[in-house]
Image: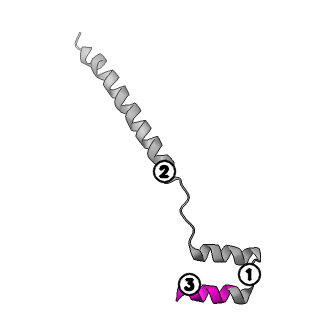
């Protein structure tokens, strides 16, 4: 009889746990979105793929940094 309060709080604790898990799951999905690439990253990728020449790469890199 002394532990009756446990059975009253158990559903509330389960509900709080479910809400916490749902919020964490929802927030976790948003944080996994890829961040937008910078212009420098795109330029590096294009150079590594051979889409632009070394001279083109260096000229554009200088334009981005200055």
In which quarter of the view is residue 7 placed?
A: top left
Dot 3 or dot 2: first in sequence order is: 2
**In the image, is residue 34 above or below residue 2?**
below
**In the image, is residue 5 above or below residue 55?**
above
In this picture, which residue range is highlighted in magenta? 57-66
**Residue receiving disc 3:** 64
Q: Are there few (<14), some (14-19), or many (20+) residues within 10 Å of tag 2? A: few
Q: Residue 52 carries which label?
A: 1
Residue 38 lies left or right of residue 8; in this view the side is right
Residue 40 lies left or right of residue 10; in this view the side is right
- Which element is circle 2 on? helix
Dot 1 or dot 3: first in sequence order is: 1
Name the one closer to the observer, 11 or 27.
Answer: 27
- Which element is circle 1 on? loop
**In the image, is residue 63 above or below residue 42?**
below
In which quarter of the view is residue 13 placed?
A: top left
Say whether residue 19 is visible. yes
Residue 11, horizontal then vertical, whole percent:
34, 22
Whole-angstrom CA distance, mark 2 to mark 1, is 35 Å
In which quarter of the view is residue 47 placed?
A: bottom right
Residue 37, horizontal then vertical, whole percent:
57, 68
Is residue 64 inside the magenta stretch? yes
In contact (CB < 8 Å): disc 3 and disc 2: no
Residue 12, horizontal then vertical, whole percent:
31, 25
Residue 55, horizontal then vertical, whole percent:
71, 90
Dot 2 or dot 1: first in sequence order is: 2
Direction top: furthest residue: 1
**Residue receiving disc 2:** 30
Question: Looking at the image, how many numbered discs can be counted on the residues?
Answer: 3
């Amino acid at each position: 009889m002394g532990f009756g309060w446990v059975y009253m709080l158990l559903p509330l604790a389960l509900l709080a746990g479910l809400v916490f898990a749902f919020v964490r799951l929802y927030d976790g999905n948003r944080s996994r979105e890829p961040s937008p690439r910078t212009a420098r990253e795109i330029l590096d990728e294009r150079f590594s793929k051979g889409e632009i020449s070394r001279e083109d790469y260096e000229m554009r890199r200088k334009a981005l940094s200055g």
